[in-house]
Image: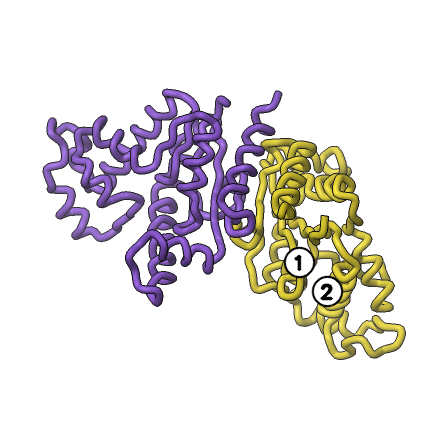
Chain colours: A yellow, B purple
Amino acid sequence: MKSIITISREFGSGGKEIGMKLAEKLGVPFYDKKLLEEAAKQSGICEDLFHKHDETYTSSLLYSLVMGAYPVSSDGKLYPDMPLNHKIFLAQFDAIKSIAEKGPCVIIGRCADYVLADNYKTVDFFIFGDMPEKKKRILERYDIEKTKVEDFIKKTDKRRASYYNYYSDRKWGVATHYDLCVNSSELGIDKTVDLLYNYVMLYEQE
Amino acid sequence: MKSIITISREFGSGGKEIGMKLAEKLGVPFYDKKLLEEAAKQSGICEDLFHKHDETYTSSLLYSLVMGAYPVSSDGKLYPDMPLNHKIFLAQFDAIKSIAEKGPCVIIGRCADYVLADNYKTVDFFIFGDMPEKKKRILERYDIEKTKVEDFIKKTDKRRASYYNYYSDRKWGVATHYDLCVNSSELGIDKTVDLLYNYVMLYEQE
């Protein structure tokens, strides 16, 4: 296996679990939150800030001005005049590229499909799901009231979409931006992993 | 195999060929233009009109008024006060449902995914492709100038999208409306057929 795989995913679709199992099956590294750790290490920006701004785009000028003044870099050289959320994006951008340099892997979210598009031949997957299954999965994982879960899912996806649409020149969730889009509620997690594995095998077959 | 499979496709993506090969591999009937023949037979509307209006939505009031006055039905009972393009759609709608009643099959385009959504458990695929491959395929099949092919592709897809968006409550090409969306330019026709076949096998596995 020689491909770099990016997975974009709806919140609650099981995209992370699918990516993890796919990486295991393919025997390659898996990057989700670990990407933020790498980006923090490389940039010198405090890791907490990556978690706080993870896949979040804030367009408020006041917010940007306030946050832009925050002392973010130990050497003071990193994009000194740029709002913090943009610095965070660019540091992640660099981390994604240096991860891709190391070889085949699975990367979850963070516009990795877009970041790598020009210089790498990636396999780009988009995982989505039906609302009842997504609600069930989120209720199992988060301490949240049952009546509020659908709203939580919609807001999280809206946030991810804004982030993606802002930093890329694409529109999140439009089929033609990806190589394969699949509804994980139809096959369930394990069979979706099998399908993606099958895709990679067919793709890499000579 | 017990599923009814619908395939929506971009023009030039090879969706029809993929559907035909998939139907053959699964040993089930395949409906593309044959659907129009069925609809004509069932409705009594002249088959030529189905070909002329195939996946075309015309919103012009004048056009509708003129066409609506056309003698479309031999018994004169079929939707007598409705513009012709709507009659054509409804006759196709009925033909799609009666085809589905007969059992597993592969149906190409014509909003079949939407028409069957409420009463049948269908497997809905969307096939798309990259422009260079789509141009190559269309140039091999149509007598058209090289400089005009991209425009022809875009216009055909725009027409299909308008038709779909008008008659369904969905938006053509949005990943989440389908079970699986795939870029046929990445795997090529035969491997895309293998992938869809693999999906159906996983889906029907107990």
Q: In the drawing, does residue B159 fall left or right of residue A10?
A: left
Q: Quadrant of residue B47?
A: top left
Label 1 packing within 10 angstroms: few (<14), some (14-19), many (20+) = many
Most foreground residue, A140 or B47: B47
On screen, residue B86 versus residue A64, left or right, reads left
Task: Name the residue that disc number 1 marks.
Answer: A111
Query: Given the image, on which type of amino acid does mark 1 rest?
Result: Cys
x and y percentages locating residue B165 in the rendered image: 38, 46
Say which chain tag 2 marks: A
Residue A155 in view in this figure = no
- Depth check, front residue: B48 or B29: B29
Residue that badge 2 annotates: A93
In the rendered image, residue A50, in percent from the top left (x then y), is placed at 79, 60
Relative to A63, does residue B190 appear above or below in the rendering?
above
Residue type, numbered disc 2: Phe
Do callouts 1 and 2 mark residues in contact (Cβ within 8 Å)?
Answer: yes
